[in-house]
Amino acid sequence: MSHFAKIKYDGTVLKVIAAEPAAIHNGVMGNPHEYIQTSYNHKFRNKFAAVGDTYDRQLDMFLPPKPYSSWILKQYVDCDIPRAMWEPPIPRPEDGSYEWNEETKSWKEV
């Protein structure tokens, strides 16, 4: 049994199911082009897909929603597996408790 994300034309994940690959490829679940395999163990495609994530076809990765419009996608490699995550344009201070202020594009101490 494998896991597959059903995606919309824009890459938005609608649902995640467990199914036999043959059922997906043979169209038993619907249009096979609407399903992208995801890894429960995070071995490929960056992360296990979740409803609301986006499948980026160019990167061949599932990405969580972008938390703020100013944040940028950082790509890196972890144990030979390509990964990506959203990061703020400036690093979070390590001393104290902070939250991101999108209006000022800076960290605000809370």
Image: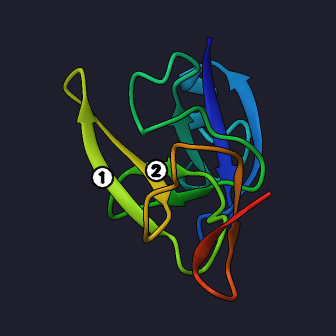
Label 1 sits on what residue type?
Gln
| Residue on which disc 2 sits | 85
Numbered tag placed on residue 75 in the rendering: 1
Numbered tag placed on residue 15 in the rendering: none
Label 2 sits on what residue type?
Met
Observer-nearest of 99 and 109: 109
8 is higher (above) or lower (below) than 95: below
Left or right: residue 25 compared with residue 52: left
Residue 2 appears at what percent x and percent y?
A: 59, 18
- Which secondary structure lies at badge 1? strand
Residue 13 appears at what percent x and percent y?
A: 70, 54
Observer-nearest of 4 and 60: 60
92 is higher (above) or lower (below) than 24: below
Q: To which quarter of the image does residue 59 belong?
A: bottom left
Q: Quadrant of the C terminus?
A: bottom right
Q: Residue at x 54, y 32 (%)?
A: 38
Mark 1 to mark 2: distance in Å? 7 Å
Residue 36 appears at what percent x and percent y?
A: 53, 43
Q: Label 1: few (<14), some or many (≥20) within 10 Å?
A: few
Q: To which quarter of the image does residue 18 belong?
A: top right
Q: In this orientation, does residue 72 appear?
A: yes
45 is higher (above) or lower (below) than 31: above
- Do callouts 1 and 2 mark residues in contact (Cβ within 8 Å)? no
78 is higher (above) or lower (below) than 92: above
Q: Residue at x 50, y 65 (%)?
A: 88
Left or right: residue 85 compared with residue 95: left
Left or right: residue 13 compared with residue 57: right
